[in-house]
């Protein structure tokens, strides 16, 4: 297998006495080793084994590095969680369909901290009594609003006051709460006259049961009343959200009403 060949039986062949200077006539075992074939680099050679071990060691190092990276990624997801993307939904005053019931599922925090367990939430009691929007100087008591015979949300009776849909979610509870108000009348601006001017980041405060529920605006949309996205506005949400609704767009002199609705979407601050 690549080593020296065995000597002939009977030991080395006899030769001249030592010191005569005459080379032996027959090859001895030692001579045959010196003159033998070079070692083979086959499957079982020492060189090949050392090479394979070196390759395997490097491969093991790569596997360990990948495993550590995957473990670190998984730990990061468990500790910090994925960032939640808020799915905004939305209704309007005079929407054509009955609003869909809001969700009562476990909330998911906007920081992504609640992955396996429910997020800690503040408990609110009582009905909402007042709404404040500092950026457009709104500070109004709230009426209780209901659906009419066509399953459309009735507008507040007082143009100077807003109202909340009492048959739906109360602001601060899980789901999409709805607060509506007039934009104007023949006498001039009404409570939600500047609602269209709200921007993402503006705050909305709702008083309820001696506590204040604070929301932050995420987007402002305008929809035709005859194509109002009822499902989007009233769709279930994973946490407390708020919809502010008023009229907008051009004025229909025949129907004596505006053609569009302004909808503000907000999430719990």
Image (cartoon, rainbow, N blue to C red):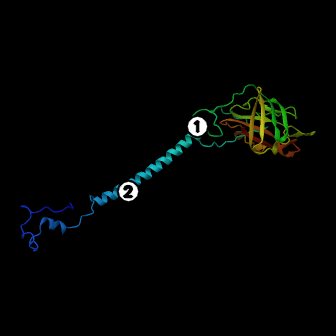
- Between 147 and 202, the one lying in front of the other is 202
- Kindly indicate the quadrant of the structure image that contains residue 259: top right
> Can residue 51 be seen?
yes
Residue 158 position within the rendered picture, expressed as x and y whole percent measured from the top left: 87, 32
To which residue does mark 1 refer? 115
To which residue does mark 2 refer? 55
Residue 178 position within the rendered picture, expressed as x and y whole percent measured from the top left: 76, 35
- Between 67 and 110, the one lying in front of the other is 67
In the rendered image, which quarter contains the C terminus?
A: top right
Residue 261 position within the rendered picture, expressed as x and y whole percent measured from the top left: 80, 42
- Between 228 and 121, the one lying in front of the other is 121
Q: Tell me if mark 2 has few (under 14), some (14-19) or many (20+) residues whose alpha carbon lies within 10 angstroms of its own.
A: few
Q: Is residue 126 left or right of residue 49?
A: right
In the rendered image, which quarter contains the N terminus?
A: bottom left
Which element type, helix, strand or loop, lies under badge 2? helix
N-term mark: 2 or 1? 2
């Amino acid at each position: 297998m690549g080593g020296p060949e065995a000597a002939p039986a009977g030991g080395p062949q006899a030769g001249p006495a030592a010191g005569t200077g005459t080379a032996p006539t027959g090859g001895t075992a030692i001579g045959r080793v010196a003159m033998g074939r070079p070692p083979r680099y086959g499957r079982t050679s020492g060189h090949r084994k050392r090479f394979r071990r070196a390759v395997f060691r490097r491969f093991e190092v790569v596997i360990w590095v990948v495993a550590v990276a995957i473990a670190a990624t998984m730990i990061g997801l468990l500790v910090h969680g994925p960032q939640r993307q808020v799915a905004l939904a939305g209704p309007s005053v005079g929407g054509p369909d009955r609003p869909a019931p809001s969700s009562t599922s476990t909330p998911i925090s906007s920081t992504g901290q609640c992955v396996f367990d429910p997020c800690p939430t503040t408990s609110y009691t009582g009905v909402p009594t007042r709404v404040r929007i500092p950026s457009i100087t709104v500070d109004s008591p709230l009426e209780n609003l209901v659906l009419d015979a066509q399953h459309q949300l009735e507008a507040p009776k007082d143009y100077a006051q807003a109202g909340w849909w009492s048959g739906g979610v109360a602001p601060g509870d899980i789901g999409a709460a709805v607060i509506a108000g007039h934009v104007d009348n023949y006498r001039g601006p009404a409570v939600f006259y500047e609602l269209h001017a709200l921007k993402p980041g503006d705050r909305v405060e709702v008083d309820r049961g001696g506590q204040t529920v604070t929301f932050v605006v995420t987007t402002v949309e305008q929809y035709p009343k005859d194509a109002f996205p009822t499902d989007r506005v009233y769709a279930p949400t994973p946490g407390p959200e708020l919809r502010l609704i008023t009229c907008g767009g051009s004025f229909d002199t025949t129907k004596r009403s505006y053609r569009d609705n302004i909808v503000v979407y907000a999430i719990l601050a």
